[in-house]
Amino acid sequence: MFALDAFHLARIQFAFTVSFHILFPAITIGLASYLVVLEGMWLRTKNDVWRSLYHFWLKIFAVNFGMGVVSGLVMAYQFGTNWSGFSQFAGSITGPLLTYEVLTAFFLEAGFLGVMMFGWNKVGPGLHFFSTCMVALGTLMSTFWILASNSWMHTPQGFTIENGQVIPQDWLAIVFNPSFPYRLIHMAIAAFLSSALFVGASGAWHLLRGNDTPAVRTMFSMAMWMALVVAPIQAVVGDMHGLNTLEHQPAKIAAIEGHWENPPGEATPLLLFGLPDMDEERTKYGLEIPALGSLILTHSLDKQVPALKDFPKEDRPNSTIVFWSFRVMVGMGLLMITLGLISVWLRYRHRLYHSRSFHWFALCMGPAGLLALLAGWVTTEVGRQPWVVYGYLRTIDAVSLHSTLQMSISLLAFFVVYSSVFGVGYLYLIRLIKKGPQPVDTLTSNTSGTPARPLSAAESVPEEEKI
């Protein structure tokens, strides 16, 4: 650890905390919308299966939401402690955008979260459903503002620079920057897919354990429909996002493809696998398909894609990392599409709830959405290097002045605390999932009119389990 300098340790620390944090909002976004669907179906049909599923996933949502808030607060403080150069340069834009997120999304969630978690028997069904909808809307609004800020760092516009600081000039241009629509849709769909696979894996686990109830079948079926429909849509959105990246960040695309140079008159091949070497400026052991890179990235068979050697060495992203992180993301996406296709075939054969091999596949795919999401963020953020604000502020100029010893100690502390606190949180989530959806007549609720503790929504269990 001490062989690294403070700059790289600061980058590792931020990557560690943000990777931990993003897992929780991703599931929160998807589960919030899923809860809207479940409660809406219960209001429409009065079928107790929907109510049972709502209460089951509400407990998991509550714990996940709490861990997301805590990890997000810790991450935000690093902008001031470890990245003061970035805050001084771009704080006049990123600060207001994060403030808008708090004033709109977080306040909306906080205002209705209590009613959603504890108000089932205390307010009318319409008001409770409205509260669930507002919490779901709040999660999407939070995504909007966070992605607006992050996208501006990739495709900055709408500002001037005076005395080394960014001065906002056009907030519409800042928010709706060129990469924002693609990144927002791509992230939202990724969150929905991650949650669907999480739900599907939970259903598969219960089916494998013989807990073949209508509620388990329903949530498993819904997750498989989601994978079938949404995973191909995500692939199309990803292609559009890639074309936008080629226009605004061509060096990132060259690094993703491990593409170093363009021989005159030759179309760009697609490298399936290989080992990019930044020192030797070539991709070793490459397995390529001729001209397919041009077809995918330019939708033609004769146009060339910019190569890494077209850019100065100091402006090149680390191709070794993004080359493989991108392929992990794509690989997970292909597995999701495969999962959806197999599910519809089994559904047609009336074996969806009886194929143990498929249930094992769905169970193993549980973390695939989150793994793809993390790989995607590694691709886009490492691919932006060596810039924090693309083309304007280099990462090395954004870091605070700390010693290597200070950064080493803080990184170790983060690792120990996060592993302990969030490790316990994950174990608690697994414990909740193992309980499974409970019949409606066993659900308990605090109807005494006394205040409930914040996590008591997650602690409500059937009386027969309180031993």
Image (cartoon, rainbow, N blue to C red):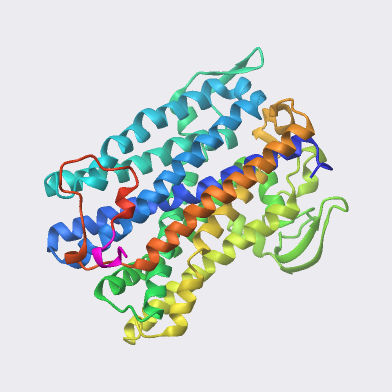
Question: Does residue 466 belong to the magenta stretch?
Answer: yes
197 or 404: nearer the viewer: 404
Q: Quadrant of residue 13?
A: top right
**Residue 219 as seen in the image, left or right of residue 394:** left
Q: Quadrant of the N terminus?
A: top right
Whole-percent x and y of residue 131?
A: 23, 43
Range of residues picked out in magenta: 461-467
Q: In the image, is residue 366 above or below residue 123? A: below
142 or 10: nearer the viewer: 10
Question: Does residue 349 belong to the magenta stretch?
Answer: no
Whole-percent x and y of residue 21?
A: 52, 45
Q: State the residue lying farthest toward the top.
A: 163
Q: State the residue lying farthest toward the front.
A: 467
**Residue 277 as seen in the image, left or right of residue 173:** right
Residue 322 appears anywhere in the view: yes
**Residue 333 as seen in the image, left or right of residue 28:** right
Identity of the residue drawn at 31% across and 46% down: 136
Whole-percent x and y of residue 273?
A: 72, 66
Residue 239 appears anywhere in the view: no
7 or 408: nearer the viewer: 408
Identity of the residue drawn at 26% across and 70% down: 215
Q: In the image, is residue 149 above or below residue 218? A: above
Q: State the residue lying farthest toward the right.
A: 280
Q: Quadrant of the C terminus?
A: bottom left
Q: Quadrant of residue 303?
A: bottom right
Whole-percent x and y of residue 458?
A: 33, 53
455 or 347: nearer the viewer: 455
Identity of the residue drawn at 37% across and 71% down: 203
**Residue 336 as seen in the image, left or right of residue 18:** left
